Every structure is written in structure tokens, then in C-alpha cells.
Amino acid sequence: MHQPLPLKYRPKTLQELVGQDAIKTALTNAIASAKIAPAYLFTGPRGTGKTSTARILAKSLNCLNSQTPTATPCNKCASCKAIDSSNSLDVSEIDAASHNGVEDARELISRSNFAPAMSRYRVSVLDEFHMTTVSAQNALLKCIEEPPPHVVFILCTTEAHKVLPTIASRCQIFNFKALSIDAIVGQLHQVAISESIAITDEAISAIARHSDGGLRDALQLLSQLSLLGKEITTDHVIEVSGGIRESDLTTIIQAICAGDVLTVLQSARTLVDSGRAPKLILSSLLAVYRDLLIVKSVPKSQNAIAGSLGYSQLRQVASNLEFETIDAALMQLHSSESQLRVTTNAATWLEVCLLNLIQNKDRQTFQKQQESYQQQNGLANNLHNKGNVKQQESHQQQNGLANNLHNNGTKNGTTKDLDAVWTTVIEATKPANRALLSRAQLVSLNNGKCVLAVHSHDARKFQTHIASIERIVSKALGYPLMVAVEQREEVLASTTRH
């Protein structure tokens, strides 16, 4: 009969336990020195070896080929075989999720009073112990605190905070940690060789990343992939696990970098139509941007990568992005992830998020252009700030005033100054555009941002042509500016002076 890989390669001794060296050492020394605790609490993520360790400990205590408890059970005697097959009379594995009431607790206490049938210890393994009710835990409290000398309780849970403190304080607690990617990769390599499974190194790494630190999940996925009957690649791993292919993620990120709105929206819609959840798409992008941040910060950080894209691809994409752009994208993705949890239209919010990522990149590009301009014109700006520019012509005076307001902020300029600057802009504009601009009033010019006040009747027209207005104003004043529009009812009368 076929045996799944997670069961076939389940550790049978403490030495075979993967990635839990501290626990392995502590239990080995406890058994060797005969310091067996009456109760143990094994906590940690799923698939990290809690139940397997409980079985190994039960075999170590009851191996018949040793006169005393041993850290190396033989796995051949009647007791070891019975424990491995879950048929032991003295070792009971109880699913606390389905046996979680007070009556179940009382029955367990009653059985604990009987001496072992053929072993040294009667071991009770309670899996998913956090599912036990508070009343049932309280019923077990006295028995766990002072059990008969031949009884050992092993409580296994993924949610230690749900175990009563009075229970936890009476147990030796062992915290099982999530396995590192390297540990999982090493184990998968050994299994692939033993089972003659053709798989690429990149695919093994993808399985390890997908398993979230759980070796059991990794072996289960490898077992499923082995049924494909051909060499396993990264795309196979992503397809079977329900993830998103590297090529799809690369297409979206490159389109974001290029500001290609159509490609971004089409790629996202294709993924959603193929059955990928918007939340999965967003979380995959979040993982990639996290990796981009690491690659940008620490170039030689190949082992720290956790997303779907390979190291070489990440370096190529990161070379075209600024640190601030990646950081802003991470903040945007995190904010949108929270929104997706509560919205009823996740696909729309995904598209909004992707468009915001493009806008963030454009904003960073604009700021770079502005900084470059200020560096190139640093001397002129410095002269403007100090007031040392000689007034030669009326047009030069207005440009100097605009630079001064731009560098020092509106607080150093009066309404008269702002009107003078706006008059300069209108005069430098083509006659066809003057009628529209003359209906606005410049109210602020500071830090690369120009704020115009318009009447509510004109607000929509200004918003529609905002991009053209930004080009006109930037060209007239000689440096890049972003234009914002405010509605003010009193503007209609005041703009007649232009």
C-alpha cells in the first residue's frame, strides 16, 4: 500500500528530528538522567514535529529492548511497533478537538489510574489541546499536577495562549520553532534522491518557501508533485499550490515600473479570472516588494529571499527602483491588504491599489527631477534666497520672485507677490490658454507645489486639464511643479484683475 511521504519520512528517533536541536538535546539528557516530567507541553506551528516528538518520547520511555528509558528506541520491539501504528494499549493519542468536554477529561483521569499493561509508562498524548474547554482543562488540572508515578501527559498545541496558565505552569514547555528554509531544502533534497524524484533546485526552494516553516506541508506538496510524472519546475510548484507564477508577477511589477496602466490592469484581471484571489495576488506582490527592499538594502542577501521571484530577477528589477519607491509601495500594499479583508469587491480594490503603486512611482520620479533641477540651479537659487539677484528686466524680476516663493514658501510672499507671479505665467502662455488661466488665482507656491483657487463653476474644467496646466506653469516658471486646485466662491470677482 502506498505510504505518503510525510508518514514515510516521519522521524522515529530524536536524532532524526529536523530543525529542533535544543529540544532534541533537552529530551535526550532528560531520558539519560531519568528526569522524566509528569507533563509536557509542546507548542509551535503546524508540521514542526510536535506529535512526532510525542511518539518518540513515548517509545523512548517504553522500549522493551532496553531495561530503562532510552533516547534511542529500537523501533523493532512490540511496544515500539504498537506505538508507531497507534495500537498501543499503554499509549493513547487523543484528538482534543473532538474529545474536549468534561466527561472526556474524567474518562482520561479514570484510565490513568490503571497500571500499564505491558510498558513502563502509560502515556497520554492530547493533540490540539487548545480546543479543550476551560471546564475540561480545570478537570485535568489536579491529575496533571499530581499524576500516578506511571503516567506521563504530553499536550500538543499550535495556540499556546489558549492553554490555561494553571495547566502550563505544571508542564515542562518546549517551543517548536518554524523550520528554516535551508533545513527544509536539505530534507527535501534527501527525500527526492531517495524516491528518485526529478526536481530542480529552484522548485525545491519554492516548495520550502511555500511551506511556511512546516516540513510536513513541504513533504505533502512534494508527494503531490511527484505524481506529475516529469521533472518538477517552479511553475509546477506554483500551479499545484495555487500560487502565482514568477512570469505573471514579473509582468505586473515591470509594468508598474514603466507606468504601463493598461498592462497592469489586464494582467491583474487575467489572474483574477483564472481563479486567483485578489488577496493572494496582493500578498504575493507584498512578498516580492519585501524581497526588493532587502536586495536594495543588502545586495548579498540571497538567503533572506522569501517570495516567488528568483534572486537574479529581483536584482534586475531593484536596479530600476529607488529605495523610497519600494518603501512607499510596501506601505500602499499593506494598507490595501487591510481593505481587502473587509470589502465585498476585492477585485476593484486590487486594481485601485496597483494604480496607486504607479502613481507613487511617478511621484518619486517627479521628486527626483525636482531635486536634480535644484542641484543644477543651486547657485541661482542661492542668489534668489539671499536677495542678491540684480533686477534687470521686468520679466526677470517676476521669475526671481517665483523662485523665491518656491524655495522659501508662501509665508515669505504677499498676495501681491503671488499675483505678480501668476501674471507672468499668463503672459508666457499661448493666447488660447490665457482665458482659462485668467479665471484662477495663485494662492500658494511652495516645495514644488502650486495651489490655484478657482470658482466652483470652473473647478471641473481645471481638474480635467490639470496635466496640461502643470506643463504650462512648469515651463513658464522654469522648474517642475505639481498643481492642485481649490474651490473658492470669491475667486470669480477677484480674477477680473488679470
Image (cartoon, grey):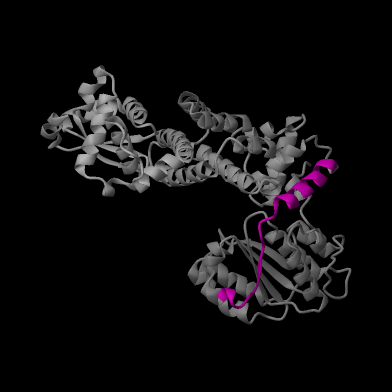
Q: State whether residue 190 is above or below residue 43.
A: above
- Residue 262 x %, y %: 46, 24
Quarter containing the C terminus: top left
Snapshot quadrant of residue 56 = bottom right
Residue shown at the point (80%, 68%) measured from the top left: 60
Snapshot quadrant of residue 476 = top left
Query: Viewer-proximal residue, 119 or 38?
Result: 38
Residue shown at the point (70%, 53%) measured from the top left: 180
Whether residue 117 is visible to the viewer of this picture, yes or no, is: no
- Residue 157 x %, y %: 60, 62
Quarter containing the N terminus: top right
Residue shown at the point (66%, 52%) measured from the top left: 213
Snapshot quadrant of residue 356 = top left
Q: State whether residue 54 is above or below residue 217.
A: below
Q: Give the range drawn in magenta.
A: 167-193
In the drawing, does residue 288 fall left or right of residue 496?
right
